[in-house]
Amino acid sequence: MRKPTLLKVAVAAIVTVGLIGADTIHTKASTTTDTFIATMSTPVKTVANAYKLYPSVMMAQAALESGWGTSTLSTSANNYFGIKGSYNGQSVTMSTAEYDSSGQLYYTNAAFKKYPTISASLTDNAQLLRNGISSDPTYYSGTWRENAATYEDAANALTGKYATAPTYGTSLINLIQTYGFNSLDSSSSSSSSSTTTTTKKKPTITYYSTLNGETGTLSSKYKSYAIYNHVKGSAYKTTKYKWTTVGGWSGRPVWFDGRAYKSDSKTTWYRIRFSKQTTAKRYWVYSKAVSLPKTTYTKEKKTATFTATSNPVYDHVYNSSYLASQLTTTKVLGTGKMSVDCKGVITQNGVASTWYRVTSGKTTGWVKSTAISKLS
């Protein structure tokens, strides 16, 4: 396990400022971010896909660990992940903070790997995640795409292992969602964050990243369908469970954190939990085993202006049958007029809420009506 360094503390502070208000970042910082993304996108996709990891997570890690490529390690040694040691005999020595057995902070000099290229740094990190540590080759297996259904799963699997900060996974997810890194995970131009797994003699299954808090219930016919640890027919080793082993009854609340679509059978699947806690065990079920609030859509041709308060912008209506993933915030999109082309009304537990699909530049997403101050 890597130990924290002074570099990591400084980088975390930089990222936090950026997330609090992207519209307040100085032009120089914005230029640095844009340059970093433009420079890193292609090598990140190439390396992450070669090792069957999530490019979005690798991109977020590189940004977080290197302060968007501004750290001394990244500029002088192409070291974007703060990895110690030497690479082909090359290293740089830097001061770092460590903790002794009693928890006291002290400072020492340490050697960090010096890489000849950006790709070499990315590849070395990918090999670390794939090969694990000497005592446990599967130490980072939670980040592998065959084990992590979504980039959120992969990011959270790094918490407590790659870094000790309890919010490490959350920080990565925030970066991915704020800057749209999830688009690197698929060649699809769809606004939904998705990954497609295709194997010989197996159906094509597309997985969609979603939030953790959307809810529904078991349907009245849930017992007519089985429950699995993976989508039935996927490339993963699938175990089928009986409902009696996991409990449940018609109308019981469930929490969603994943959606999948099987192209051969044209069926939708959901990953559910029986507890609000995100650490609860998760299962995959066919869509007819659960009930989600109904959403009614109508066409609109209007313009909207956002309120001064920052609100989330999703790829779908929150808690609809598509489930949702956050794309950005209204504060990031700006204060100008946005075009509106669709309205959605969703009713849950007898309470109706209205949503609008807005477009600003290259971003199209859904916002709740309360995020709009004027609609005309």
Image: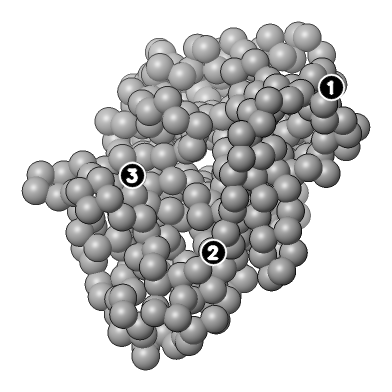
Please say if the residues under marks 1 and 3 sit with CB atoms less than 8 Å apart.
no
Q: Position of residue 153 (x, y in %)?
A: 47, 52
Does 196 sit left or right of 59 as displayed? left
Q: Position of residue 262 (x, y in %)?
A: 28, 50
Q: Is residue 193 above or below residue 248?
A: above
Q: Position of residue 81 (x, y in %)?
A: 52, 31
Of callouts 2 and 1, the N-terminal one: 2
Mark 2 secondary-structure assignment: loop
Mark 1 secondary-structure assignment: loop
> Mark 3 = which residue?
206
Dot label at residue 335: 1
Amino acid type for the residue under numbered disc 2: Leu
At 20% from the left edge and 59% from the top edge, which residue is drawn? Answer: 233
Of callouts 1 and 3, the N-terminal one: 3
Please say if the residues under marks 2 and 1 sit with CB atoms less than 8 Å apart.
no
Dot label at residue 374: none
